[in-house]
Image (spheres, helix red, strand yellow):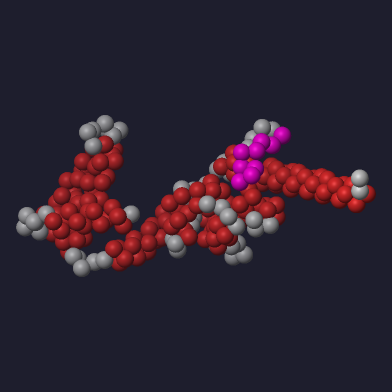
Amino acid sequence: MSRAIAIARHYSMEIHNDRSLVDALGSVERETAELRTEVENGSKGVDGIKGEAIDVFNSTLDVLFLAHPEITMEEIDAIMEAKCRKWMLKYAKEDDQTCTETMREADDIMSELKAGGLTIEEIAEVANIEQNSVECVLDGSLASRRTKARLNAIFPVLNKAFGGKFRSMKTIWMKEGPDGVTFHELLSTKVVDLTKLGSFVAAHAADEESRRDEAFETVSGAELNAADGP
């Protein structure tokens, strides 16, 4: 996001037309009106909601940079984090998951999954959020209660099965269970069926143990044959 803000700052600082803060605010109001039109007409205009929303973004940043040309990207990031955190805490009414004091924080679980060998993309699938959100949470942003509750429910099942070596999950990522549903599909659902997930990884653990036993018997038999000689 800082790159987008840096681009807007560049053009804001390079446009020299003696505009005042009131002039810049007028642009915000005009662009907001155009965005409203796009929302009301179903984004059928030339720029659509996407283009008009960015116009509002740019004109608002123009006000910021005219008023505070000294502001740094780091300061903007800090203010953005604080404002967005407040935004989520105040307005995420649909985020009704119950989180107890004993639950681990989302960033703690994500860090452990990453240390165990999962990529950002794979962690995003486990958490059912965007990769960008995983990166933000790992960098200190607040996770939603929904994400926190989901990770606290899923992680113990995965940790029991893989013992912290989560990179081995990749070997069964596309493996199908008895019902034809893959491990990946089980994890990708909005609400994970923990019973099915537990059964799936338990079956995988049993298969792995069976393969180890077979390998051990094969090696042992070969050693016995070698000891008997020709």
Residue at the spot 30% in from the left edge and 55% down from the top edge = 3
179 left or right, relative to 73: right
Q: Position of residue 9 (x, y in %)?
A: 21, 57
**Which quadrant of the figure has residue 69?**
bottom left
**Which quadrant of the figure has residue 51?**
top left
Q: Where is residue 141 in the image (x, y as percent from the top left)?
A: 44, 61
The answer to whether any part of residue 50 appears in the image is yes
Q: Mostly what secondary structure, the magenta segment?
A: loop
Residue that lies at the very extreme toward the front in this rendered image: 230
Viewer-nearest residue: 220 or 66:
220
Residue at the spot 64% in from the left edge and 50% down from the top edge = 168
Residue that lies at the very extreme toward the left in this rendered image: 18
Residue 175 colored magenta?
A: yes
The answer to whether any part of residue 127 appears in the image is no
67 left or right, relative to 187: left
Instruction: Identify the magenta region.
Output: 170-178
Q: Quick one: quadrant of the C terminus?
A: top right
